[in-house]
Amino acid sequence: MNTMTRTRTHFRRRLPARIAVTAVLLALTVPMAQADSVGMPRNVPPAYVSECAACHMAYPPVLLPAASWQRIMGGLDRHFGTDASMDPASVAQVGNWLQTHAGSYKRVREVPPQDRITQSTWFARKHRDVAPEVWKRASVRSPANCMACHSGADKGDFDDDRVHIPK
Ligand code: HEC
Ligand code: HEC
């Protein structure tokens, strides 16, 4: 009985510390572990908005590993079938920022085919219930068009409670 009491006290004392550690771990891994709030880091370089979001939304950097961003920034003149070149100063600035904020959580660390977010294993898993024909709807056009279904995607909000697949 004595042992029992001691064990309980011991457990109770350690609990707050455990919660604190868990909270820190969650904060670090939440981008992909939970993946509903991916987040756009602060200090977004102006060119990331004016240039990189000219043809599609500004993808949160955490969605690709550093190696993918590096390759993308090194080949903007041949960018997924289009020319996305910008001035060298902007390339350097945006490139550095992407490297700093790239995804490093284990699911994002692996380089996806074609350096596409939409070819990542986690992307396929999160979207396995979306029927193939849905991606081709005129209202969706492409899996890369996150905003079609996640209206807060440009702010890093992918919460599945706020997903809406357009007709
Ligand atoms: C001239 C238009 C244009 C500009 C400017 C542009 N992109 Fe793209 N980007 C595209 C097209 C087109 C695709 C392919 C979209 C698709 O498959 O639906 C693409 C795809 C991507 C993808 C892969 C999306 C996926 O399928 O996962 C990433 C990442 C990306 N762009 C990043 C950037 C970055 C970073 C910049 C700024 C340096 C940029 N883009 C500027 C046209 C552009
Ligand atoms: C055709 C609509 C559609 C498009 C386009 C789309 N998604 Fe999704 N996404 C969904 C649906 C539906 C779910 C929820 C799946 C579920 O709950 O089973 C989801 C779930 C997610 C999740 C997991 C959310 C959670 O709470 O676990 C992430 C992260 C995500 N999407 C990211 C993206 C990104 C990044 C893009 C663009 C590159 C994108 N999605 C494009 C429909 C879409």
Image (tube, grey):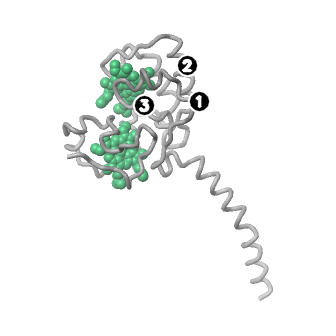
Q: Earlier in the sequence, mark 1 or mark 2?
A: 2
Q: Quadrant of ligand 1?
A: top left
Does dot 2 land on a helix, a strand or a loop? Answer: helix
Specify few, some or many for label 2: CA neighbours under 10 Å numbering under 14, 14-19, or 20 or more: some
Task: Name the quarter where the N terminus is drawn.
Answer: bottom right
Q: Earlier in the sequence, mark 3 or mark 1?
A: 3
Q: Nearer the viewer, mark 3 or mark 1?
A: 3
Q: Which residue is more in the foreground, 19 or 11?
A: 19
Quarter of image, res 133: top left
- Residue on which disc 2 sits: 93
Whether residue 124 is visible, yes or no, is no
Q: Is residue 162 above or below residue 145?
A: below
Q: Check contact, mark 3 vs mark 1: CB within 8 A.
A: no
Q: Nearer the viewer, mark 1 or mark 2?
A: 2
- Residue on which disc 3 sits: 58
Quarter of image, res 7: bottom right
Amino acid type shown at disc 2: Gln
Where in the figure is residue 81, as x and y percent of width and height?
Answer: 30, 19
Where in the figure is residue 2, as x and y percent of width and height?
Answer: 80, 86
Distance CA(mark 3)–CA(mark 2)? 15 Å
Amino acid type shown at disc 1: Thr
- Residue on which disc 1 sits: 100
Q: Is residue 22 above or below residue 153?
A: below
Distance CA(mark 3)–CA(mark 1)? 16 Å
Residue occupying the point 35% across, 39% down: 146
Where in the figure is residue 111, as x and y percent of width and height?
Answer: 46, 33
Q: Check contact, mark 3 vs mark 2: CB within 8 A.
A: no
Amino acid type shown at disc 3: Ala
Where in the figure is residue 28, as x and y percent of width and height?
Answer: 60, 46
Q: Earlier in the sequence, mark 3 or mark 2?
A: 3
